[in-house]
Image (tube, grey):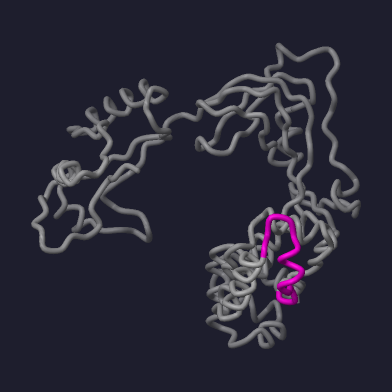
Amino acid sequence: IYCYGIGACEGYPLPNSHLEQLELLKQFGFRVSSETKKAIGIEGCLEYYQNMLAKRNELPFEIDGVVYKIDSIPLQQQLGFVSRAPRFACAHKFPASEEMTRLLSVDFQVGRTGALTPVARLEPVSVGGVTVSNATLHNLDEIERKDIRIGDTVIIRRAGDVIPEVVSVVLEKRPEHTETIHLPSRCPVCGSEVVREEGEAIARCIGGLFCKAQLKRMMWHFASRKAMYIEGLGSVLIDQLVDEGIVHHLADLYQLDLTTLANLPRMGEKSAKNLLQALEDSKKTTFNRFLYALGIREIGEASARVLAEHFSDIQSLQAATVEELMTLNDIGPVGADYIVHFF
C-alpha cells in the first residue's frame, strides 16, 4: 500500500505543503512512492509525465497515468471539491497498451438484462504486463464497422489498463479464409429467441429469469454492496444455487434453509448460518437500495433514490403511469416505460 495524503490528524501540527506532508508520512513509517516530484508550471508537468511514461514498465506497481496536485494545502482547501472530484488535482492518463494477436473464435455472453456481448477468444498475448486471451467486441455494429472476422490478426488494447478490447484488424495480415461473425438466433445458454430491436445496437435473449445466465447475473446484482448487500452470496455460490435448481427466482433466496445450504459443496454449517443471517439482515434495507437491487433497466442508484423519495411504497410505484414517472428528475420516457413494464 502506498500513501498519497493525510485525511485527518489531531494533536499534531501538519505542514502546509503536500510534499512536506508526504515526507512526514515517510518519517512515521508509511510507504510513499519515491516517484513523487515537484514540478513547476505546464512544462514541468509534461516533462514529469514523459519521464513516468518512459519508466512505466519498470515500476514495482501498475499505473495508468499521473496526477497533478497543487502543493499548497490552504489553496487545496480553498479550491475544494466538485461532487467527488477535487478541484486542486487532475489526472493525465497514459496511452493504452496495445499488442497484436490472432482472433481464434467468438463466444456470446449473456448479461443481467439479456444483452448478448460478443467476446473474442485470442491467442494469448502479453499486453501491459498482463496475459490477455479474451477481449470484448462490444456489439455486432462494432464488429461490422471494424470488419472483424475469425482468423484475423487484430490489435488488442487494455482500455484504461483494465478491460481488453479489439481495436482494429491488421488487413495486410488477413488470411485467405476467414469466418464472418454472426449473431446467434437463439440464446447460447437457454435457447430462447434472440431479438434486436430497431435502432438498438444490442441484441437480447428474451428468456428473462428462465435463462440461467440472466438469473445468475441478476442475483449477483441483487446481492451486491450497493443493492441488498448480502455478504457471502458470491458468484461461486450463485452458480451452485442456480445450477442445482435450488433458486429459480430472487424470492427463492429468502426460502433457503440451513440443511439445503450446509449440504452444498465447500459450504458447511457455519457458512450456511452466516448467509442466512445476511439474508435476514438484508430485509432491513432502504427503499431506494431495494429498487436499485431489482435491476430495472435504465434505473441506476440516482434514479432509484428519486423514485424512493417520490413514492412511499412499492404499491404506489406499481400504480404509477408513464406520464407521472416522466415528471420526476432523472426519469426519461425510456426509463419510465421500463418501470411500468417491469411491474
Query: Percent from the top left, x then y, of residue 284?
Result: 56, 81
Residue 287 vertical position relative to residue 14 in the rendered view, above or below: below
For the N terminus, the image quarter is: top left
Residue at coordinates 66% horizontally, 24% vertically from top-left?
Answer: 124
Residue 301 vertical position relative to residue 183 in the rendered view, above or below: below
Query: Percent from the top left, x then y, of residue 173?
Result: 72, 12
Query: Percent from the top left, x then y, of residue 260?
Result: 76, 69
Residue 261 as seen in the image, left or right of residue 233: right
Residue at coordinates 76% horizontally, 45% vertically from top-left?
Answer: 109
Residue 224 vertical position relative to residue 201 in the rendered view, above or below: below
Residue 141 vertical position relative to residue 157 in the rendered view, above or below: below
Residue 223 as seen in the image, left or right of residue 242: left
Image quadrant assignment for residue 49 = top left
Residue 171 as seen in the image, left or right of residue 327: right
Q: What stretch is highlighted in magenta?
A: 254-268
Residue 186 as seen in the image, left or right of residue 280: right
19 or 40: nearer the viewer = 19
144 or 264: nearer the viewer = 264
